[in-house]
Amino acid sequence: MTTYHCPQDGIRSSTSALTWRCPICRGPWDLDFTPASGLAPHVLSGRANSLWRYEEILPLATPSASLGEGRTPLVALTETVSAKLDYLMPTLSFKDRGAVMLAELARRLGPERVVADSSGNAGTSIAAYCARAGLPCTVYVPEGTSAKKTEQIRAHGAVLVTVPGGREATALAARAAADEPGVFYASHVFNPYFLHGTKTYVYELWEDLGGRLPDTLVVPVGNGTLLLGAALATAELHALGLIADRPRLVAVQAEAVSPLAAAFRAEAEDLLPAGPVAPTLAEGIAIPRPPRARQILAAVRASGGTFLTVSEDEIRDAQRDLAARGFYVETTGVACWAAVRGGSGLGQRLELGSVVVPLCGAGVKTGMAG
């Protein structure tokens, strides 16, 4: 039977329970799940053209909540850097990969309502998939969230709660609601089913590249859900004998809010004491204290990767540069291109080899940076 477990103290809980975090340390759950063998590029022919084609490696199957998510294009930007266009998802962000897993799980559990918190994209995604699943949903967002994102959340029929303050205040408000009876907390941070959705990003790369992966995966990191999903996928592919070597993971943060980069450079296993937080255009990764910080730092180090940070000017320039190439991407979604677009100089210094960056969210969600 699939169960939750706490990576800190080993406590376990049934996945049929609505307990959303470890009752001892109050940290996020991981999932006891082992993928089935048998996945190979040739067996995928004729399967659904969505992330559900990778049925052997998913903890849920035969979905009712799907909107056809996944299988986004992989397009070359330079001779060594390619972009995966995850903004071409049903709700225009990569968060659909994990949100569909949470909505499908919630649909099977039948809670009285679903609660989520977000800086925007996860909230719009949860709202859409709850609408698809016929589940009542409430989404908490910080004040100042993009009007286009809040409009999208309301359009899907979710109740929108705007919380004064920043991302941490919003999370605390949602977690208080999550403790009420009959509530399923569709947390893209605390619930590991989300990570088993985001890992399909890497499985798609593996399929698109003919059963291999690039030398380096560069990913934006706030709460780390895409990075941890990528680490999970590379570990699974390696254990299944489907790749010989794991790619390095390079994590990108905005200079204005970069607690993980600071901890990594200090060779710390967890976050350092909180420092000042400045405004950033990369609102989707502006997370001062990510709950899975220890796991993120460990995953980057285990891969032989590193952290990079980008300035606000670099984010603006990268967004304009991508737009000039035909890609209209929101400011958070351009962070990885901002980190590597210096091109050969950076690539040679870090020996990145072949690289894939995700373009995570559509520009229509935020508009162009001023």
Image (cartoon, helix red, strand yellow):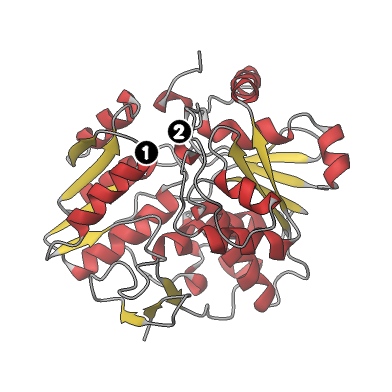
Who is closer to the viewer here, 251 or 367? 251
Image location of residue 149, percent across then percent down = 33, 31
Marks 2/1: CA–CA distance: 7 Å
Which quadrant of the view contains residue 91?
Answer: top left
Label 2, secondary structure: give it: helix
The first of marks 2 and 1 along the sequence is 1
Is any part of residue 211 visible from this angle?
no
In the image: residue 132, left or right of residue 214:
left
Image location of residue 145, percent across then percent down = 33, 29
Marks 2/1 in contact by CB < 8 Å: the verdict is: yes
> Could you tell me the amino acid type at mark 2?
Glu
Image location of residue 200, percent across then percent down = 53, 59
> Could you tell me the amino acid type at mark 1?
Ser
Label 1 sits on residue = 119
Label 1, secondary structure: give it: loop
Label 2 sits on residue = 283
Q: Which residue is drawn at 35% across and 44% down?
A: 168
